[in-house]
Image (cartoon, rainbow, N blue to C red):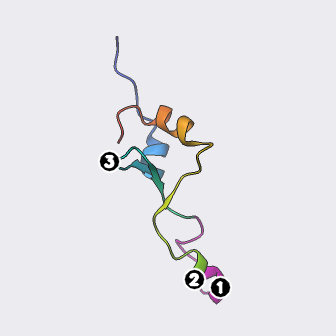
């Protein structure tokens, strides 16, 4: 059986932890932070969050080898 290809876009956005949880980075944290309110900057401060349970199965299909 041939090897499965990893989806490169998913590889850049998600990673799997040792306990097979899907870790992601919150959105709106990269640039243009000066125009956002202090509340927006504070609530988005967490760089590492976990993906919602409803999408985990789809993400794991895109990362067949747990990149």
Question: x, y (%) of residue 28?
Answer: 60, 69
Verify whether residue 39 appears in magenta.
yes
Q: CA distance from mark 1 to mark 3?
A: 32 Å
59 left or right of 38 in image: left
Q: For mark 2, what is the residue?
A: 42
| Res 35 seen here | no
Label annotation for residue 39:
1
Q: Is residue 57 left or right of residue 19?
A: right
Residue located beneath label 3 in the image: 18
Q: Which residues are magenta?
A: 27-41
Residue 59 seen in the current view: yes
State yes or no: discs 1 and 2 in contact (Cβ < 8 Å): yes
In the image, taking residue 56 as reference, residue 17 lies left or right, namely: left
Residue 3 covered by magenta stretch: no
Q: Residue most toward the top?
A: 1
Crowdedness near tag 3: few (<14), some (14–19) or many (≥20) residues, C-alpha within 10 Å: few
Q: Nearer the viewer, residue 32 or 37?
A: 37
Q: Position of residue 60 (x, y in %)?
A: 47, 36
Foreground residue among 9 and 57: 57
Quarter holding residue 33: bottom right
Q: Is residue 5 above or below residue 33?
A: above
Helix, strand or loop: magenta stretch = loop
Residue at x 60%, y 42% (from the top left corner): 55
Could you say which quadrant of the image residue 42 lies in? Answer: bottom right
Q: CA distance from mark 1 to mark 2?
A: 5 Å
Mark with earlier residue (1, 3) = 3
> Which residue occupies 59% across, 50% down?
52
Residue at (39, 24) in percent of width and height = 4
Q: Is residue 2 above or below residue 63?
A: above
């Amino acid at each position: 059986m041939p090897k499965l290809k990893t989806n490169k876009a998913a590889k850049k956005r998600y990673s799997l932890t040792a306990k097979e949880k899907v870790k992601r980075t919150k959105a709106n944290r990269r640039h243009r932070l000066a125009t956002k309110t202090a509340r927006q900057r504070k609530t988005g401060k967490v760089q590492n969050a976990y993906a919602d349970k409803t999408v985990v199965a789809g993400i794991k299909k895109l990362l067949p080898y747990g990149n």
